[in-house]
Image: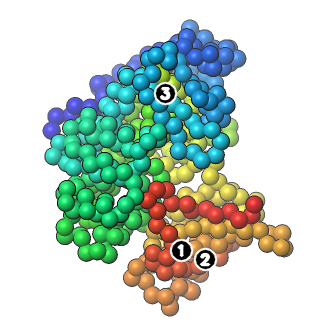
Amino acid sequence: MRRRFQPAYKTSEELAALQLAGLQWTVRHAWEGSSFYRRRLAEAGVTPESIRSFEDLQRLPFVTAQDLQANYPWPLLSVPMSDIVRMHASTGTTGKRKVMVYTAKDIHDWAEMFARCYETAELTRDDRVQICVGYGVWTAGVGFQLGCERFGAMAIPAGPGNIDMQLQFIVDFRTTVLCCTASMALLLAEEIDKRGLRDKIHVKKVIFGAERSSDAMRAKVKTLIGADHIFDIPGLTEVYGPGTGLDCPHHTGIHYWADYYILEILDPDTLLPVREGEVGEMVYTTLRKEGAPLIRYRSRDLSRAIAGVCPCGSLLPRHDRIVGRSDDMFIVRGVNIYPSHIDEILSRQKGIGSEFQIHLDHSDDGKDYMVLKVERDDAGKPEEDTVLAALIERAIRKETLVSGNVEIVDYQALPRTERKAKRVFDHRT
């Protein structure tokens, strides 16, 4: 199949030149069109003429989610309002939403980026793509559909929820690709297994978005559905929406679209680049975004860059799966713990399922306590729970330096969700 949506550059030198030109354009565009950016750049002693090399990126000030909320409703608007054809907002539930605006060119670019995702996953125009994510002001559903239509496959805009309808669509419409959160995929996979539909479906690829998924969850979904591949699609409203990259069928990291944005991986405390291969915060600078350009936007998402060339031969750079957020860390007895670290430890343990919850409490003795509720594998035996819990407790204590009690619960005892699964329940406040 002809590759229609891959980048035009052929060498790393061409990419570097493209990124520098895009950086210079973005700074000038923001300076001329946005009072927020002009003020912020002037405070940092930077003008458009200051950007002469890629190293000058380090001189630019950061933008944060708090900046977007403080300047609500049109925080980064950099063109006349008459040029805006659409707005989207984040799914955040606290404070004012982060609102992004789009020109017609922005929508076109987003569609091209997303079509590249489908092409990277080696879809064809014969695929039938069931989109099981939310529509509305957030970017999920419309982004998946926009890219699908640009790519040329058939979109089935099912939206979230309504499991009976989803399963009917999968069977009747002979869906070949599912796009959903990892939690929704698990819910669908378990229902397919429970209802004996495995031989009636044709799903070969699943694209996860919006939340981190463990290896255990991915393996479970793949087995129950009978899919050949599970792909990860990152993205956030501030950078167009979902579709900023995808792992190819070799699954050695997420190829990201470096011809549309610059990605820095920085230490969230020092804001300096981490060493190669280390986990850091993902910081974005867009290269051609008109309506609401980003200059060094701190996403709070955590990942690491992957060096070298992918076995697929693509020159697109790669980052690892997103392991969590720098602001979802919790502290127990003075130790910083990320839910993703607990997830990683549990993924290595045999005999348990993919679902877990972390409960934090503060007792009368003044100490913090952590309790993990972990599902037993569907083939597990309750009489082995005590031994299994002890094994997990030792692993948690060894790797986090914090003791926690583990409760093994029945398979499917923890709630399933059509959206993002809640993992941490902090009862201390």
- Dot 3 falls on a residue whose secondary structure is strand
Q: Which residue is mark 2?
A: 406
Specify which label sits upstream in the sequence, 1 or 3: 3
Q: Is residue 208 visible?
A: no
Q: How many marks?
A: 3
Q: Quadrant of residue 154?
A: top left
Specify which label sits upstream in the sequence, 3 or 2: 3
Residue 204 point in image, percent of width and height? 23, 57
Tell me, yes or no, whether the two marked residues, 2 and 1, touch with CB atoms within 8 Å. Answer: yes
What kind of residue is marked 3? Val
Q: Which residue is mark 3?
A: 101
72 on left or right of 219: right
What kind of residue is marked 1? Val
Question: In the rendered view, would you say 280 is above or below 32?
Answer: below
Specify which label sits upstream in the sequence, 2 or 1: 1
Spatial CA distance of label 2 from label 1 is 7 Å
Residue 178 point in image, percent of width and height? 30, 54
- Dot 1 falls on a residue whose secondary structure is strand
Q: Nearer the viewer, mark 1 or mark 3?
A: 3
182 on left or right of 367: left
Q: Residues within 10 Å of mark 2 (few under 14, many from 20)?
A: many
Residue 161 point in image, percent of width and height? 40, 58
In which quadrant will I find the C terminus? bottom right
Which mark, residue 183? none
Q: Which residue is mark 1?
A: 374
Give 130 or 329, whichever is nearer the viewer: 130
224 on left or right of 237: left
Q: Is residue 74 visible?
A: yes
360 on left or right of 294: right
Q: Residue furthest bottom?
A: 383
